Amino acid sequence: MASFNYTFTFISLTDSCDLNISFNGDVEAFEELINTIKLGIFGRSDVKDGVAYFMRSFEILYANCENLVSHLSYIKCPQLRALPAWIKNVGYDNYFTVVTNRIVPQHESFAIRAKIEELQFGIPFEQTMEQIHELTSSIYSNFSVIAYDGHKRVYIGPSQKENRRCRYCHRTQGDGAKFKKIGHTISEGLGNKAIITNDECDECNEYFGQNIEPHFIRFIDPLRILFGVQGKEHKITKIKGNNFEMELLPDTSKTFNIKIFEEPKGDSHKNDFSISLKHNTDIIPQNLYKCLVKYAYGIIPEDLLNRFEPTSDWLLGKSEHLNLPLIRIAYVNGYEPEPRIVVYIRSNDDSFLPYAIGEFHVLNMIYVYIIPIFTDDETKYCDSNGWQKVLDIFNHWNCLNWIWRNLSSLQPQQPIMNFNFSKRNS
């Protein structure tokens, strides 16, 4: 029995979605499966790998994708279940693109969206590409960009243990540090199997795993069930809170149950209602911020780490700060199976810009935040008005609906996740 993988990358004007198919079996069965999916999406199976196909979101395509999901209910692929909703969110008669079995680099995704605008609105391709250049040139003229997306296994830091110096506590093997454990840059509980930080010693690894990272994982627990995240040991199948139980049913059904122990808001017998899922374990908001910063700090090149010594002290609880910058959160259509981390490091001396910014993509959420080095200049980002120059430079964020969050508090709080439900039109 062999293992096979195949990807379909969907790109619209405002969103993207990766459909990753993993299959164990013989090659004939795998090819039959992929051809079935191609027939459901394209209406034909003679689709060439790596080619960008521009399509329109007709109602018949939505119906075909729903039938495809039902027909392939045995496939372990939560993105496939989400595909009909993604097609619907594109908007009927609107264009989108599908690229098969190839990773689409950022610059190409810009060009694809420019072509979609030309097809959909008649805006000349060259005009859009010129505007994109204007948008991104401001970023690259002020920041260097480091990014990892979890599709390919990568190791950050020295490969030889004797050459490692822990990026957090700054100890080496000669100082008593051990490097026996795998230092996952982003928590395994969020689905990260590929991005590894070599220079994270076992003691710091244990500290983050016990004191910091569980707070973020608890914060998004219901979404881990919803998207069937493969956690540290196996898929997360059940969680229990103060007012709910949530369980992913066996793989044959590809559905989950939610039991709510209080009345929902609205009318659950009609069209719209909402529920608030309340966890049974508190979190500390500042530990959410620390967790986000830890993920970003884990990919910063070794030669830049000396600038972040105050950051590492704060992450390990050696210093205390009670007035942190605001962070931004956006919820997007679609789903990313592996978390993605981007770090922007300022490449000039402009003190009106933060030295480092993190951008973390997980499931259907994007977090944007300052990676603090605790200078006086950073206090301006404790107010949303202080972010204005950053937002002017990062114009590509403006297409999303963002909310501001203050995560400075050290007081335990009960995590609550709100879900809104509306009846789907037949």
Image (cartoon, rainbow, N blue to C red):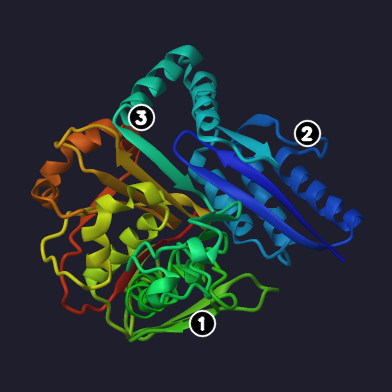
Left or right: residue 355 versus residue 374 is right
245 and 352: which one is in front? 352
Q: Is residue 330 left or right of residue 256?
A: left
Q: Which residue is mark 2?
A: 48
Q: Determine which quarter of the picture holds residue 57.
A: top right
Rendered view: 261 above or below 314: below
Tell whether label 3 touches label 1 (CB within 8 Å). Answer: no
Front position in the image: 381 or 222? 381
State the separation of the CA atoms marked 2 and 3. Answer: 34 Å
Report helix, strand or loop for mark 3. Answer: helix
Residue 92 image position (x, y, % from top left): 53, 37
In the rendered image, residue 101, in percent from the top left (x then y), is placed at: 70, 42
Residue at 29% across, 75% down: 415
Does the image show residue 391? yes
Mark pair 1, 2: CA separation? 40 Å
Question: Could you tell me the amino acid type at mark 1?
Answer: Lys
